[in-house]
Amino acid sequence: MGYKVKRGSNPTDNTIKDMVVGFIKRLIGVVLILALIVVVGYFLFQFMYGRFEPFREAADDVISWVSVFYKENGVWATLGVIVLVCVATWVVGEEAKKKERRKKAMEEMMK
């Protein structure tokens, strides 16, 4: 006589349908968050453009550079450069955080 012991749930309990539904929910969440960021960014841009002359001049310069690049290279190259700038900015921020954490860890070790 043997006993059948149930130990937790089977990893095969998740069906493909559950995985697809979870993916779609996450995708909708990401799209909604990105849409919110774009809307808030647009209104902040309009506010700053209307109120501050230095911002207006800088924004006009950037818009002219992007439009010239877009006319010469197309939409995919323009989006690629924009993504590259965003990722590079994120990497610089992460490296600064990493350096600060390392510095704090060294200070803690020296105490």
Image (cartoon, helix red, strand yellow):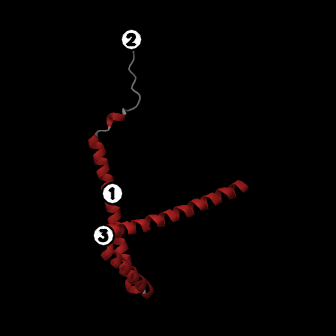
What residue is shown with label 2?
1
Amino acid at circle 1: Gly
Q: Residue at x 33, y 78 (%)?
A: 67
Above/below status of 109 relative to 18:
below
Q: Secondary structure at mark 1?
A: helix
Label 2: state its secondary structure.
Answer: loop
Residues at marks 2 and 1, CA–CA distance in whole angstroms:
52 Å
Q: Earlier in the sequence, mark 3 or mark 1?
A: 1
Q: Which residue is mark 3?
A: 75
**Gap in Å between the C-alphas at discs 3 and 1?**
26 Å
Say what secondary structure mark 3 lies in. helix
Please state which amino acid type lies under the numbered disc 2: Met
Residue at 44% x, 64% y is 87
Q: Amino acid at mark 3?
A: Val
Residue 88, position as x, y percentages in the image: 47, 65
Q: Residue at x 37, y 66 (%)?
A: 80
Q: Position of residue 85 (x, y in %)?
A: 43, 68
Q: Is residue 3 above or below residue 77?
A: above
Badge 1 is on which residue? 29
Name the N-terminal-most of marks 2 and 3. Answer: 2
| Residue found farthest to the right | 111
User: Residue 42 falls in which quadrant of the image?
Assistant: bottom left
- Per the model, the C-alpha gap separating discs 2 and 3 is 70 Å
Quadrant in the picture for the C terminus = bottom right
The mark that comes first in sequence, 2 or 1, is 2
Structural crowding at the residue carrying mark 1, measured as other residues with C-alpha within 10 Å and reported as few (<14), some (14–19) or many (≥20): few
Comparing 23 with 36, the one in front is 23
